[in-house]
């Protein structure tokens, strides 16, 4: 069993990359993120970080467990509503509101997973989409969500009673810490024995079953972890922008995170971060022009699929490996 798992690790090394380049890339990314708010608009950077964490959470499911979910907006948007409501109406501090949002998404992920996890391929994707649409209609109808108006004017509050989140730099570095926490959780998961089993299930599930693994339990745990981290991103986003709306839970949000992951590189650790940064940047700067944003992003996606079939990071890693 150990031999088979190690074989899968070697086969998937191109996806995660060797340890030294990975640590070097992480160090470069950290240095860039620490200095970025002095060069760019902090709110824009915080949006990038929130969606990067969302994309990384989704990538944990599709890139390493091989499960395509079209319902991740339910976890992202559901946590945003819970965080916004508990902070604004209940008066809880932001850290508790974000935690409750993540816990809500974890519980929702457990329910979704128990229903959908025994299905595969398009059937799994369609079940998650249907369940996500149920959450969307609940968000539209429940009184505390305020329908199409959403929950607005959410106070950022004070983190741990010390740090004033109304200050842009304080808020930015708080979001950065949240992102790094989520990213490190994913990194540790991928490089753990649990992560190796997930890759084995992705590559050949019948073989994993024959080796004695209870694959449904592994997939369910991966689904819940992915949902939790997506909720962490959604709750943080609600504090940053001080609102939670139907945009956060609609099916287009699920499609957008799929796009981010595929553009950056599915099954890579840094790919979703690059993909999220690219999509958010395009949306931000193209919004000030007369160009149709979805059409431009769609055209870029087509070009990337044709030129970078493994995604931007995946293709670069593959070419570096061939040259090495």
Image: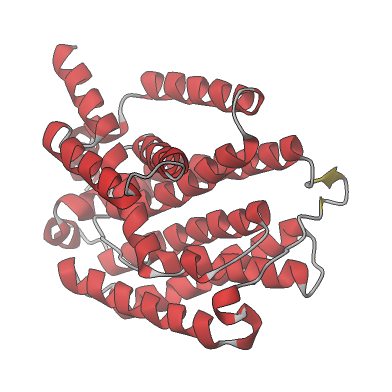
Q: Quadrant of residue 124?
A: bottom left
| Identity of the residue furthest to the right in this view | 162
Colouring method of the image? secondary structure
Provide residue 175's location: percent of width, then percent of height: 63, 43
| Identity of the residue furthest to the top in this view | 324
Towards the viewer: 96 or 300 = 300
Residue 214 visible in the displayed image: no
Q: Quadrant of residue 38?
A: top right
Residue at 44%, 78% in the rendered image = 136
Quadrant where the C terminus is found in the figure: top left
Provide residue 190's location: percent of width, then percent of height: 38, 43
Counting every numbered tag in the picture gives 0
Q: Is residue 217 left or right of residue 321?
A: right
Towards the viewer: 270 or 312 = 312
Residue at 46%, 52% in the rendered image = 54
Q: Is residue 207 left or right of residue 270?
A: left
Provide residue 102's location: percent of width, then percent of height: 58, 63
Would you place residue 280 above or below residue 235 in this image?
Answer: above
Towards the viewer: 42 or 222 = 42
Residue 39 visible in the displayed image: yes
Residue at 60%, 73% in the rendered image = 150
Would you place residue 73 above or below residue 138 in this image?
Answer: above
Residue at 48%, 58% in the rendered image = 230
Provide residue 145's location: percent of width, then percent of height: 61, 79
Q: Is residue 100 left or right of residue 303?
A: right
């Amino acid at each position: 069993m150990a031999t088979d798992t190690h074989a899968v690790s070697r086969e998937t090394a191109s996806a995660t990359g060797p340890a030294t380049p990975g640590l070097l890339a992480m160090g470069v990314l950290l240095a860039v993120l620490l200095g970025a708010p002095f060069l760019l608009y902090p709110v824009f950077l915080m949006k990038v970080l929130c969606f990067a964490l969302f994309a990384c959470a989704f990538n944990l499911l599709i890139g390493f467990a091989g499960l395509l979910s079209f319902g991740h907006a339910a976890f992202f948007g559901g946590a945003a509503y819970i965080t916004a409501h508990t902070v604004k109406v209940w008066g809880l501090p932001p850290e508790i509101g974000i935690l409750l949002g993540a816990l809500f998404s974890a519980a929702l992920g457990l329910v979704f997973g128990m229903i959908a996890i025994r299905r595969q391929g398009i059937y799994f994707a369609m079940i998650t989409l249907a369940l996500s649409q149920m959450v969307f209609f609940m968000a539209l109808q429940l009184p505390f969500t305020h329908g199409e108006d959403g929950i607005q004017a959410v106070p950022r509050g004070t983190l741990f009673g010390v740090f004033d989140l109304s200050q842009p730099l304080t808020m930015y570095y708080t979001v950065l810490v949240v992102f790094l926490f989520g990213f490190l959780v994913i990194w540790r998961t991928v490089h753990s024995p649990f992560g190796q089993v997930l890759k084995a299930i992705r590559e050949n599930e019948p073989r994993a079953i024959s080796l004695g693994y209870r694959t449904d339990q592994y997939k369910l745990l991966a689904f819940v972890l992915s949902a939790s981290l997506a909720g962490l991103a959604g709750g943080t986003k609600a504090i940053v922008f001080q609102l939670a709306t139907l945009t956060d839970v609609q099916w287009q949000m699920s499609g957008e995170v799929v796009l981010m992951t595929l553009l950056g590189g599915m099954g890579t650790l840094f790919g979703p971060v690059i993909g999220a940064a690219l999509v958010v940047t395009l949306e931000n700067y193209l919004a000030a022009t007369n160009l149709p944003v979805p059409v431009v992003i769609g055209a870029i996606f087509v070009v990337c699929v044709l030129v970078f079939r493994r995604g931007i990071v995946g293709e670069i890693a593959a070419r570096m490996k061939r040259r090495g």
